[in-house]
Each structure stands twice: as structure tokens, then as C-alpha cells.
């Protein structure tokens, strides 16, 4: 007895993630790139000191770091798509708050919220890629995702510069709002090419257990990566606030 023919599902490849993962990631990263160069300038325009403007720049990164663990729980509970919807709304709200902030303190708070939204969005994409890609392609797919985001971060300042020239410094935030909405529309229109259901059998782990189990990595490579990140952000902040 011959059974009904089954439809063959194409195996995951790096190329299969192009439209559903890499394109929206590029769009969102370009939006972030448009905003980052003008954060310190906006804070200074609102009356912030050089030190407070530097804090406003740092708070975006601090928000991303501080919200990584809650973002992981949120993605696990809601799923990648719902989490990215929430992250997009949070990003747009923070950008609107940045444009309308009457004081540097409220503006700095908006930058922190923007970092939280970016943390959720990025973690949702990383989770999806990690879930769907086979082990032998996972590293390549994740590194490609990182490269796409860096390309977006490179293109974004040029888009922001055009907008700032046309409408003033708020134009950079408008660029990010538009790109955030466009990126989410792409996510809604383009179906995910692979089932993102994670493998069964994973036991939940506490944060303290993860930190303890990988403390050697955190104390060596982790400190090195953090130091390089602080140097790159610090040098950019110094140039923009002086």
C-alpha cells in the first residue's frame, strides 16, 4: 500500500534566512545607526552638560545589557514574533519620547528604554536563528546576522545625516521610526521559512548557575569584549560631546 506523497521541506540554509531575518535586521540596525551619532548632540541641545550627554549615550547600551535577561524570559513566554512586536512598539515609543523630551533627564530615560527595546528585538532574532539552524551552520548564520547588523549600522548614519540636513536633528529619530515600522512590516509580510520550535529536553537554568558555570569565559573573553565595547562607545561620545 502506497502512502500519500509527502512534501519535501527544504533544509535550513544561510540563504533561506535572507528575507525573513537578515533584511529586517539590516533595516532595524540602520535605524539605530541613524540615531546613535546624534544622541549626545540632542542631549546638549536640551541643556545637558558634557558629562550628562555622555551618560545619555551610555544609557542606551546599559538598557540593552540590563534587559537581556528579562528579554530572554519574554521571548520564551511570548515567542519571537510577539516579542518583536512589543520591541518595535517600545522602540517607537522611546524615539517619540526622545523627540518630545523637554529635559535632558527625560531624554536620557528615553535612551534607556530604547536600549531595552533593542535588546528584546535582537534576542528574538538570535533565538530564532539558533533554533532553526543545524549545528554545522549555526555559527555561520549567527556571524552573518552580526555582519548584517554592522552593515546597517554603517549605512544608518548616512541616512540620518540626510534627514538632519533636511529637517534638523530630529530627522535622525524620524528615520529610525520609519525604518522600525518598515522592518516590522517586512516581518509580518515575509513568512518565517522554518519552524522555530526549539528541541525538547532542555532543562531551565538559573542565571546564577550560568554565570558560575561559565565564570572563566566571562572573566577572560567577557571582560575583553566589554572593554573593547566601552572604548568604542567612549571614543565616540568624546568626539560628539566636545
Image (tube, rainbow, N blue to C red):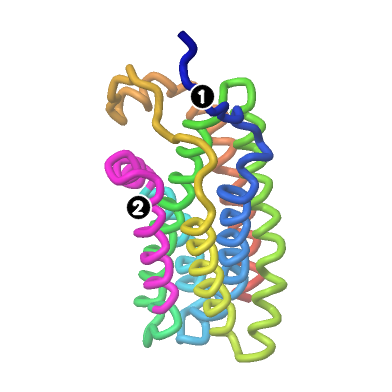
- State the extent of the magenta-drawn residues as a range: 68-96
Magenta span: predominant SS is helix
Question: Residue 82 got which mark?
Answer: 2
Q: Which residue is at the front of the view, 37 or 163?
A: 163
Q: Quadrant of residue 110?
A: bottom left
Q: CA distance from mark 1 to mark 2?
A: 31 Å
Upstream in sequence: badge 1 or badge 2: 1
Q: Is residue 3 left or right of residue 212?
A: right
Magenta stretch contains residue 90: yes
Q: Which residue is at the front of the view, 130 or 222?
A: 130
Residue most toward the front?
Answer: 1
Q: Residues within 10 Å of mark 1 (few under 14, many from 20)?
A: few
Q: Is residue 232 above or below residue 126?
A: below
Q: Quadrant of residue 33?
A: bottom right
Question: Residue drawn 61% across and 91% down?
Answer: 167
Foreground disc of the pair 1, 2: 1
Looking at the rendered structure, the secondary structure element under dot 1 is loop
Looking at the rendered structure, the secondary structure element under dot 2 is helix
Q: Residue 212's x, y, as percent?
A: 36, 22
Question: Residue 6 got which mark?
Answer: 1
Question: Residue 167 got which mark?
Answer: none
Q: Residue 137's x, y, as percent?
A: 63, 26
Question: Residue drawn 46% across and 58% down?
Answer: 188
- Looking at the rendered image, the quarter that the C terminus falls into is bottom right
Q: Quadrant of residue 210?
A: top left
Q: Residues within 10 Å of mark 2 (few under 14, many from 20)?
A: some
Q: Which residue is at the front of the view, 23 or 169?
A: 23
Q: Residue 92's x, y, as percent?
A: 42, 71
Q: Residue 61's x, y, as percent?
A: 48, 56
Amino acid at each position: 500500500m502506497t502512502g500519500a506523497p509527502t512534501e519535501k521541506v527544504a533544509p535550513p540554509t544561510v540563504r533561506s534566512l535572507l528575507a525573513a531575518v537578515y533584511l529586517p535586521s539590516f533595516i532595524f540596525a540602520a535605524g539605530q545607526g541613524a540615531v546613535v551619532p546624534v544622541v549626545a548632540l540632542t542631549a546638549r541641545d536640551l541643556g545637558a552638560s558634557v558629562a550628562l550627554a555622555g551618560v545619555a549615550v551610555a544609557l542606551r547600551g546599559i538598557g540593552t545589557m540590563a534587559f537581556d535577561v528579562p528579554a530572554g524570559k519574554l521571548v520564551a513566554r511570548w515567542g519571537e514574533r510577539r516579542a518583536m512586536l512589543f520591541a518595535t512598539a517600545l522602540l517607537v515609543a522611546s524615539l517619540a519620547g526622545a523627540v518630545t523630551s523637554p529635559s535632558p533627564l527625560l531624554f536620557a530615560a528615553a535612551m534607556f528604554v530604547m536600549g531595552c527595546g533593542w535588546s528584546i528585538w535582537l534576542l528574538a532574532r538570535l533565538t530564532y536563528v539558533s533554533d532553526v539552524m543545524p549545528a554545522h551552520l549555526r555559527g555561520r548564520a549567527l556571524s552573518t546576522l552580526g555582519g548584517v547588523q554592522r552593515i546597517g549600522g554603517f549605512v544608518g548614519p548616512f541616512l540620518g545625516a540626510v534627514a538632519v540636513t533636511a529637517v534638523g536633528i530630529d530627522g535622525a529619530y524620524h528615520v529610525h521610526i520609519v525604518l522600525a515600522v518598515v522592518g516590522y512590516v517586512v516581518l509580518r509580510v515575509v513568512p518565517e521559512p522554518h519552524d522555530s520550535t526549539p528541541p525538547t529536553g532542555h532543562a531551565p537554568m538559573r542565571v546564577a548557575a550560568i554565570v558560575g558555570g561559565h565564570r572563566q569565559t566571562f572573566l577572560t573573553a567577557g571582560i575583553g569584549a566589554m572593554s573593547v565595547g566601552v572604548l568604542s562607545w567612549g571614543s565616540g561620545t568624546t568626539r560628539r560631546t566636545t
